Image (cartoon, rainbow, N blue to C red):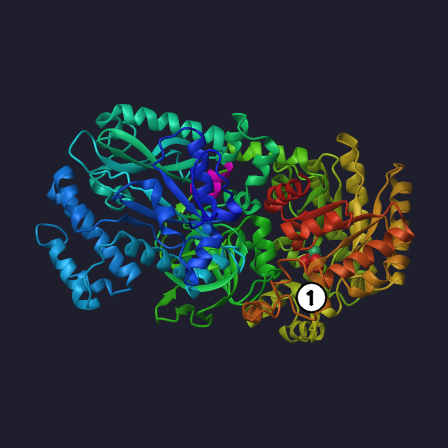
Amino acid sequence: MQQDDPNITLITETAPIATQTHGGRAKCLQRLVRLNLPVPRTVALSFASVHDIAEGRMPNLAQLLAPFGAHPLLCVRPSSEDPDWGGPSAVLNLGINDTVHAALSAKLGEEAATRLYNRFVRTYAVHVERLDPDMFSDLPDHGPDALAESLRAYREETEEDFPQDPRVQITAVLKSMARAWRGTTARLLRQAKGAPADAGLGLVVQEMALGLGRHGECGSGVIQRVSSGTGKPRFTGRYLSQSQGREALQRGKQSLYLARDARGESLQDLAPEAFDKLVEYTELMRFRLREEMQAEFTIEDGQLHILDALRVSRTSRAAVRIAVALAEDGVIPREEAICRVDPRALSEMLHRQIDPEAKRDVIGKGIAASPGAATGKIVFSAAAAQASAARGEACVLVRRETGPEDIRGMHASVGVVTERGGITSHAAVIGRGLGLPCVVGVTGLQFDMKNQFIKARDGRVFRGGDLITIDGSDGDILAGETPLHEAAQDDAFQSMLSWAEEFCDIGIRANADTPADALVARKFNAQGIGLCRTEHMFFDPGRLTVMREMIFADAPADRRTAIDRLLPMQRADFIELFRIMQGQPVCIRLFDPPLHEFLPSDRAGLRELAEALSLPLSDVTRRVESLSEYNPMLGMRGVRLGITIPEIYDMQARAIFEATIAASRDGAPVVPEIMIPLVSAKREVELVKMRVDAVAAAVRTETGRDFTYRLGVMVETPRAALRAGEIAPFAAFLSFGTNDLTQMTYGLSRDDAGKFMSEYVKQGVYPEDPFHTLDTEGVGELLMIGAQRGRAARPDLTLSICGEHGGNAESIAFCRAAGFDYVSCSPFRVPVARLAAAQLNI
Ligand code: PEP
Ligand code: MG
């Protein structure tokens, strides 16, 4: 006697079925059986069995078919470990042949029986025999001749009669499904969704509940308790009388709503008892499977059958609401709700998104530099953007790249596109700070700034005033207007955020330069400002002129005059920031960029500047040229400016201390943090510290008021990381500026890498864009060295990261493991960072 095959298992309450050996569908069906739901008899084939089938070793068919009795009609479905990994399509009505057809004709009527047979013949021909689906396209779908025609076409193509033996049918179906799983496309698709290379497939063989018949209501449908779009409670799904499988969804117009609905007929009206049972069953599934499930069901002669259940598909917004509701109803603990939401989902909720159902007419692709979507008319200059905003017309600013003179235009736009740049370029950083969708480093579009148009590869030309939509969440640029979903910082979002706060064990601060940024930071409960890039405070048009006067000053006295005018402006900025942050730490970085960034680059701008400064154009041009550098990012910037033109840092220190006194007078006491950028040598810190301490002493003497402050160093050159041991004694904190540190460690321009980054990632040179996800091996080693050497020299040293990586989940994990005190990221990324950090602590 042949032994029982352990890889064939009838699904019962106690059968040994596991997701890892039989797949998620088989396991879920077992759970439904345990809930006593009316699930048709089902047999599960394990991964091992399907592997054998693909290799040509068939399982014991007698054992497989035994539970189903004589002449059963069966359905075979895939059961992979994770339902998202897909699998071959289900095959219905297996087992039908001329004899069964005759019996079914007597029972269901000839037409219904013929429909079932015809459907199986065609499915078998296409999916099992791999015949061309077009061979049926000219044949009738139903009617008396449809079946005969299909059988004839089958015979002609295969030179064999359609197999009548159910064993032959099932052998062929199982083989074809097992082999389809091994196909290259299927493998690539599931690997893209995270499946391992050796992911297994199980199969479930289930007795058909027909959904067709003459005695009482018959039909099929799907049901779920919540909307996939919003996650709000609402019975959704469709039902169709005299149908099978997912026909109710495919033939939407003819199908019925589930719950009573003013728009049309419903199952609740048609078969109230079945509907009530579905309500009861889906509720039970929610509580016992601890998830919102979509159930596939059939009604046969008035009797309800539950064939299958799948996790409800969901948008980010729905994912958050579903997780929160499950926790609030006590179905899952809060910790689990927190872990069920992908942190990126929160980011999507903070911004408008393109409707996932919308058609996308993509004309270009770039780096998704700042999330969210926006539609607007194209403008090619900051001035045009402002004019457009004044007319109340939404516009998208299109530039080769952006600089300080574009800030006003960015404020006036709903989105920004730049031909050049990467994830840390000017447009990207400012865009994220403003919560403005932004795509940089675009390929597929030709930018003609002179003639003011962009041209798609298909030849379409878009000029100023033409509508485009940009998707900063995935880097697409689309022609015309595209339907958008509004941002959704609803009650569920707020609950998720406050729960994450409870479990988060690393500080989350925000990079904020302006009062508007600081307000966003507070709204998301950031624990202070981790980086205030002071140069962004000089981009305002009024200030830009004073800044330029300072840059152009030849004599120290002239420079002094300009700096004296900048002082009250900076002081006012800091007072406002301190007040908004209400005693939370505010880390102010002293002036960092090369001075020429504040100067115009084109002729018109030079002429304007000459006018404003009452200088000959030739003088202005010469000065601008003298400031230009071959490698500005490695040139006269950061602390190097502080050493060579110390008046700028002196002024900033004074503004910070005076603001500290003013803000502490009527608010919570402020302890400002002052950070020195681009340090590479201990002596730089020593020199700056001496001057800053001297300014503090002077302000104390002048005002008769005392205050404290913390001076720290930004570690963004490899040398600063390596020499952290000798720098730390002069610094209360080290904050790793991983944008520059990445740039300098790789020797890779952060503004130019976008051009070839996708090619590099595609060819596997880098696993990911290192400006986006921290390179834990190289840059990460420098972080570890800096942290260890710094802490060894000064155990109370505060450690943090303030590059763009501060908002990235993997990078946060690294910083947390390395014992950092906090991470700092764009204000809009604070919720994402907090959720990611909370998940690490659960
Ligand atoms: C950095 O370099 O990581 C940083 C935060 O500074 P910035 O981006 O302003 O150069
Ligand atoms: Mg930097």
Image point (62%, 41%), residue name: 835
Q: Quadrant of residue 229?
A: top left
**Magenta includes 319?**
yes
In depth, the one of 517 and 5 nearer the eye is: 5
Quadrant containing the C terminus in the rendered view? top right
Disc 1 marks which residue?
A: 743
- Identify residue type, mark 1: Gln
Residue 696: image location, x then y, percent: 87, 46
Count residues near mark 1 (Cα–Cα under 10 Å), then give few for <14, some for 14-19, many for 20+: many
Question: Up-down: is 301 above or below 603?
Answer: above
Q: Quadrant of ligand 1?
A: bottom right
Residue 306: image location, x then y, percent: 35, 35
Image point (32%, 58%), residue name: 172
In depth, the one of 257 and 759 nearer the eye is: 257
Does the residue tagged 1 have its C-beta within 8 Å of any atom of ligand 1? yes
Range shown magenta: 312-320
Number of numbered discs on residues: 1
Image point (61%, 43%), residue name: 516
The outermost residue toward the left is 144
In depth, the one of 128 and 597 nearer the eye is: 128
Q: Is residue 726 left or right of residue 554?
A: right
Q: Secondary structure at mark 1?
A: helix
Residue 195: image location, x then y, percent: 52, 55
Residue 23: image location, x then y, percent: 47, 47
Query: Is residue 112 visible in this depiction of the protein?
Result: no
Q: Quadrant of residue 266?
A: top left
**Magenta includes 422?**
no
In depth, the one of 835 and 692 nearer the eye is: 835
